[in-house]
Amino acid sequence: MATNRTFTMLKPDAVRKGYIGAILEQITASGFRIVAMKLTELTVNDAKTFYEVHKERPFYNDLVEYMTSGPIVAAILEKENAVEDFRTLIGATNPEEAAEGTIRQKFATSISENAVHGSDSDENAAIEGAFHFSGREQF
Ligand code: UDP
Ligand code: MG
C-alpha cells in the first residue's frame, strides 16, 4: 500500500451516539479521500489481534470488550502525509488533552472510549487496512 494512506475505525461509542456522519464530514473536509469503507464488527479474536501490542497493559481486556461492544466503521483514507495528518486531526488519546476542534475533543467519551482509531505508522496502516479490505474493495 502506498505511504499516503492511513487506516481508521470509528469506534463503537461514536457509532452508538450517531456521530458517523459528522466525523466523516470532518475527515473529508480535511482533505482525506475515502479509499475503502464498511460498517462491520470486530470479533474478540479480531480485537485481540488488532491491539496485541497492548496485551500487557492494564486496559487491554476492557479495550477488547469495548471494541467488540457494537459495530464500527472501518476505512482506508488517502492524503499526502496521511498517517501524521490524521493523528493531528483526531487529537490526543485522552480527549481531555486533545486540541480544540480535533475529532476526539469533539466526539470522544473518555480516554478508553475515544471515538476513533488512527494508524501510528505507514507500516501499521498497511497491515490494518489489509486486515479489513481486499484489493478489490480499495478504490
Ligand atoms: N486506551 C485506554 N486506556 C489508556 C490508553 C489507551 O483505554 O490508558 C485505549 C484507547 O481506546 C486507545 C487504545 O487503547 O485509543 C489504543 O491505545 P494507544 O496508546 O495506541 O492510543 P491511540 O494510538 O489510539 O491514540
Ligand atoms: Mg495506537
Image: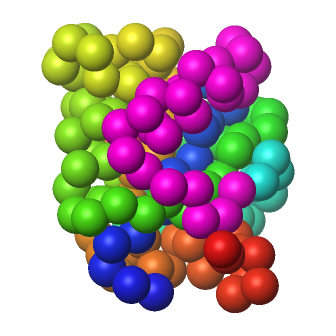
Colour convention:
rainbow
Q: Position of residue 99 (x, y in %)?
A: 18, 19
Q: Is residue 49 visible?
A: no
Left or right: 25 as drawn, with respect to 137? left
User: Seen in the image, is 123 located left or right of residue 138?
Assistant: left
Name the one closer to the observer, 115 or 75.
75
- Confirm whether the magenta stretch covers residue 136: no
| Residue under the point 35% across and 61% down | 79
Q: How many marks?
A: 0
- Residue 81 in the image, given as x and y percentages of width and height: 22, 63
Q: In the shown orientation, is residue 24 left or right of residue 52?
A: right
| Residue 54 point in image, percent of width and height | 39, 58
Residue that appears at 66% across and 74% down: 139
Question: In percent of the image, x 23 and y 31: which residue is there?
Answer: 92
* Image quadrant in which you'd find residue 69: top right
The answer, for residue 139, to whether it is visible in the render is yes
Query: Is 18 part of what is drawn in magenta?
Result: yes
Residue 124 higher or lower than 95, as above or below: below
Q: Is residue 137 shown above or below 35?
A: below
Q: List x then y, in percent, for residue 12.
A: 68, 31
Span of residues in magenta = 15-37
- Residue name at image x 57 percent, y 34 percent: 24
Closer to us: 13 or 83: 83
Left or right of residue 80: residue 38: right
The answer to whether 113 is drawn above or below residue 126 in the figure is above
